[in-house]
Amino acid sequence: MEFLVIQSLNGLASASSLFLVASGLSIIFGVTRIVNFAHGSFYMLGAYIAVTIIAAIGGQDALGFWTGILLAALIVALIGALVEVVILRRIYAAPELFQLLATFGVVLMIQDITLAIWGPEDKLGPRAPGFRSFVMIMGSRFPSYELFLIVVGPVVLLALWLLFNRTRWGTLVRAATLDREMVGALGVNQRLLFTSVFMFGSFLAGLGGALQLPREAVTLHMDLAMITEVFVVVVVGGLGSITGAYLAAVLIGLVHAFGIVLFPKSTLVLAFLVMAIVLVVKPYGLLGRKPSGHAARGQAIPEPLLSPADRPTKLLGAAVLAVLILLPPFLGDYGVTFMTELVIFALFAASLHFVMGPGGMHSFGHAAYFGLGAYGAALAVQWLAAPMAVGLLISPLAAGLAGLLFGWFCVRLSGVYLAMLTLAFAQIAWATAFQWVEITGGDNGILGVWPSEWAKPKLVYFYLALALAGAGIMALRHLIFSPFGFALRASRDALLRAEATGLNVQQLQWAGFTIAAVLAGLAGGLFAFFKGSVFPTYLSIPKSVDALLMVLLGGVQTVSGPIAGAFVFAGLEEQLVRITAYWRFVLGLIIVLLVMLFPKGLAGSVLAWRERQSGDRS
Amino acid sequence: MSVVLEVSGLSKSFGGVQAVDGVSFAVSAGELLALIGPNGAGKTTCFNMLNGQLKPDSGEVALAGRRITGLPPRVVARSGVGRTFQITATYGSMSVRENVQTALIAGHHGEWSLMGKATDKHQAEADALLDLVGMRDQAARACGVLAYGDLKRVELAVALANEPRLLLMDEPTAGMAPNERIALMDLAAEIAKSRSIAVLFTEHDMDVVFQHADRVIVLDRGKLIAEGTAPEVRANPQVQAVYLGTGTTYGAAG
């Protein structure tokens, strides 16, 4: 009984800050339809800024402490406004995946800015004046600050309710959440509304971060840790629903509090499992509604014709292949290693393109299949002493099985919900690799995953990778133009029409999802033997974003795009890491600029340019 | 003539609204039946139940004597029902010919084939269909750039691809210029007669209805209020009341 009460209180306390951040994200999404990846970064900034301000104004007394907290949240609100005005305002019309990507660029930039200002060491904030003692609850000492936090959640919920139901601004926000075009047509200044909403959401995130000070150390990893949990909360609660966010925050908080005691190895998995279950039963969250109005109307950008490569593209492809075959013997070890990585990434990117482009399913967790392929191979080597050939067979198989399982859930959703579900599944896979130390070695990974004797020379392994990755890419290209590929694309282009001609859209998409997983798994297997080791980072969000960047750099709407994108991205990252310690900032900046300047991707822009050229001639 | 579609006692309610209430009718091979009624009469709900997009609360739908009530759209399509949508739905990233080819691939159960190129499949059949609807010369164009009337023709070709026994057309001429409307419905009627396809269509344009429909059924507030040839329906006082009003709203009788 005592255990139940104490853990429930713990769960409620952590639910409050989760709720603050999640409600901010939810409000922003409701109005702007942008899932703001950088929301976790605002949370982190809130904590860092609060540390600095409280130290500066000497927050030992209550006045100084609470002023510091509030000031920090206000500063974060201003930073949010800046981000909205400078970046997001320009991409409201872009496809949702580009928006998600741009905000991830902001995450990278803020990470490095924070590192530059506050340094890599963890910071400890002061304890809250007046809440430094303990309260005795059923014979246990319970921090009074935790009790304070438990109260904060419902109080903020009530305040938000009053704000949205009793003020003009709140009414406008609710109206815009339902139908922003109509609100615009009624003469409301949309820019001001959007900016103010973004500020307000950022304020809540900053407040959530600042209030965490007395509870835990402030670290550079707070942002991504928080944002994944917040995604879970928002999706479980229903995007755009504040009450839903609170219910979900409590649910996730409790799952955490009890999970950490009962299944200490699987806390992360538990939270994501809850999310997966909720999404399957209620696809739009506990209190969410099926998107309608402007969300359902979508962008009326006509899809360009997808046609097989024309002569110039084929010639270019042949030239690239010739270079890939002929050049490496003349390169040193470093060059060969770099090119091996390039071809493996090209296959990874091509597999993501298959599911996103022709498949029309926006996966934000494609690294899951890459990583599971790598782990499949590594585990076979480690525990079954399998040779490389067997390992490379197991990789696509393992990833394919995961694709079959996860895909079954994913094809039941679409759009941003699908993106978040794929992300959740990727996080489950990551958490399993990270926490199941006995089998996977946890953070230390699995070492000694080396190729067979004959493939050990770097040049030989390069040709092996080139052959397998090349075959995989050719197979995907072939599939895109096969009857199956056409049926898949038909399902994406016009779902009702496809069904009305007898196509089983869900099954087609399920198959497409699985095929993409299989080939990502092959890429992962190749990568494992190439590096000689596997780590949980292979399944992590940044890895998924890498693949997304490659595809979006190249352009989703072209077949050759992702390969070009993989080459550009891998080269870029390699150079950046060598040139500057702040490569994340530069990469983030490049992402943001790319999304703003080339919403069609590099290959897409080249295509559009060529179309314009030929259009001028005719 | 043989009965292709037989509907009996079809009902559907949304919350407290009885959208379709005990509707029964039949369409024979080669016959064009128009389903008309004012806005909100339940035409589209009725249509979506025939096609399988909505499950009826009660009632039966039979296609050539076989019960298809409540089956999903793809199964209904496979049993010989083609349909066009009120807002044209074509595959935007494909050319006109590829649109028809994809429909033919589905019609021949070829969508799971991983071998060969889709553009090599059923070329002759696709061209024949495009000839039929007069779109052969635009076969290579992208669907995304077509004029609306042409898009409707492509959709007709797609709907005809799996040789349906029944063709459902939801507002086939909505959004078209008057002369285009007549041309499209002439085409549909001709195809229906020559291939003995039963056609059920909803329509707001009464010129189109009275010129092309063999028979007309009238829906009002979910109920079937009249059925007959065009002149009969036109002369029906209840239909006139529904469409023109009786004046009772403003009179003392209300």
Image (cartoon, rainbow, N blue to C red):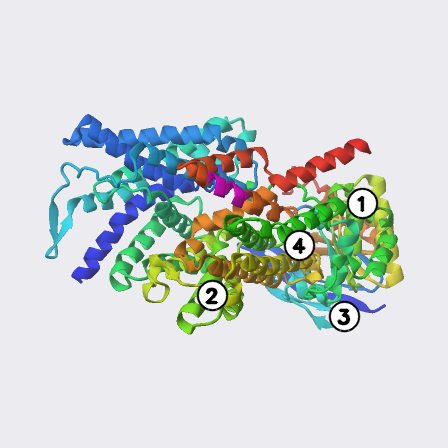
The image shows residue A64, relative to residue A353, as above or below, that is above
Question: Nearer the viewer's eye, disc 1 or disc 2?
Answer: 2
Tell me the SS state at disc 4: helix
Answer yes or no: are tags 3 and 4 on the same subunit: no
Residue at mark 1: B150
Q: CA distance from mark 3 to mark 4?
A: 32 Å
Q: CA distance from mark 4 to mark 1?
A: 22 Å
Q: Which mark is residue B64?
A: 3
Q: CA distance from mark 2 to mark 4?
A: 32 Å
| Badge 2 and badge 3 both on one subunit | no
Is residue A575 one of those drawn in magenta? Answer: yes
Q: What secondary structure predominates along the stretch shown in magenta?
A: helix
Looking at the rendered structure, the kind of residue marked 2 is Ala
Which residue position holds label 2? Answer: A377
Residue A323 position, x and y percent, is 65, 49
Tell me the amino acid under the disc marked 3.
Ala
Residue that badge 4 annotates: A489
Label 2 chain ID: A
Circles 2 and 4 in contact, beta carbons < 8 Å: no
Q: Is residue A123 left or right of residue A81?
A: left
Magenta stretch: includes residue A119? no
Residue B95 placement, left or right of A598: right
Element on which disc 1 rests = helix
Q: Amino acid at mark 4?
A: Arg
Mark 2, other Cα within 10 Å: few <14 / some 14–19 / many ≥20:
many
Q: Which residues are magenta?
A: A569-576
Q: Quadrant of the N terminus of chain A?
A: bottom left
What amino acid is found at the position of numbered circle 1 in the picture? Asp
Residue at 40 percent across and 71 percent down: it is: A383
Identity of the residue drawn at 54% across and 41% down = A98
